[in-house]
Image (cartoon, rainbow, N blue to C red):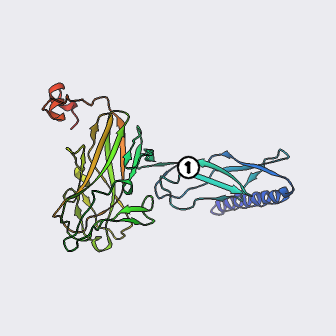
Amino acid sequence: MLLIPFIILTFFTDENIQKKEENKEKEEGQEQKKLILLFIDKYPDKMKYKEGEIFDDTGLILKAYYDDNTSPQIFDYTIDNKSPLTIYNTKISFSFREKTSSLYIEIINSDNIKIIPNPSSLKYTLEPTKDVITRFEIEEADLNDWIIYNDDNNYPQNNIIERNDASRNYFLSGLEKDVLYESKLIFYINLQFDAKIEISVSYSQKEEFKNEEYYMPLIYSFIADEKNNIEINNDNQYLNRRDDITKWQLIKYKAFNLLKGEHNITLKVLEDREKGTPNIDYINFKTEESKEIIDIPSNDFHTLLQYQYILEPDPNLIYK
């Protein structure tokens, strides 16, 4: 009985090998014909990937079109990307005899939400898209106000570092000593709609501090429009110990609301804090259109939360 599955598997394997060999012979026999184009007859089975996964061409049917109107299936093609995928690798190209055909895949997070690069053409400005996650690379922020001195040096220690494990091969390096002065980094957000926003930040640590656990609210602070502190989720407040410094940890922050228009987000590194300020790679912005944001009159002394309690009789419906 055990031989039957083995015989069947061997039969189909041999049959597939034979088909590929026959097709290769046909391809070699086509050399006298002119190859017009390469086209995808059937997409691969998998079209959505998480970052770090490798593209899988299982199920792909690629065909060549010749000048005699024949279209044989092609097996002997090359794939341009066999490395771990990022949001910047959504185009996959296949080549055969100097002809190329391409398809686009989606990069998603663990909740199956699409992640895209920041579409803004303006430096330091984020332009989120509805119902997706938009990524802002921290090296694109304005570093003019990010001037931090260590306690035993009189020159700035912040650097943009090139390293392959970062999302676009660059990250903002953390500090090695105690932070002597508070400093800040500012970027801008341009919203085309009233939005509920959740951010998550990719952190890692230097080799000499990888065995330490860090309480992040005491190190970095995010502030919207210079007045509203963006808090970290209660269950996600520690940067964990790690064996490998190239393993980045995504720390999530509590959702907040912003009205349509231009805003600024300030990232502060707090003074007199523990040494080993972590590295930062990118910030992900999950944005949903909100119909419930209240525009407080400029001459009103209430906070947004107070205003919500005034206008909404049911406290359970108020998003804090």
Name the one closer to the observer, 305 or 126: 126
Label 1 crowding class (10 Å Cα cut-off): few <14, some 14-19, many 20+?
Answer: some
Residue 16 occupies quadrant? bottom right
Q: Is residue 236 left or right of residue 29?
A: left
Can you say which quadrant of the picture contains the N terminus? bottom right
List the residue tagged with mark 1: 46
**So how many labels did they put on this image?**
1
Q: Residue at x 28, y 47 (%)?
A: 265
Name the one closer to the observer, 313 or 190: 190
Query: x and y percent of residue 222 in the render?
Result: 25, 50
**On screen, 146 above or below 42?**
below
Task: Give the structural element (helix, strand or loop) at label 1.
Answer: loop
Residue 197 occupies quadrant? top left
Q: Residue furthest left?
A: 301
**On screen, 279 above or below 93?**
below
Q: Identity of the amino acid at label 1?
A: Lys
Name the one closer to the observer, 45 or 128: 128
Query: x and y percent of residue 236 in the render?
Result: 26, 54
Query: x and y percent of residue 22 in the render?
Result: 80, 58
Q: Is residue 38 left or right of residue 300?
A: right
Q: Residue at x 62, y 46 (%)?
A: 43
Query: x and y percent of residue 129 in the render?
Result: 41, 39
Name the one closer to the observer, 293 or 10: 293
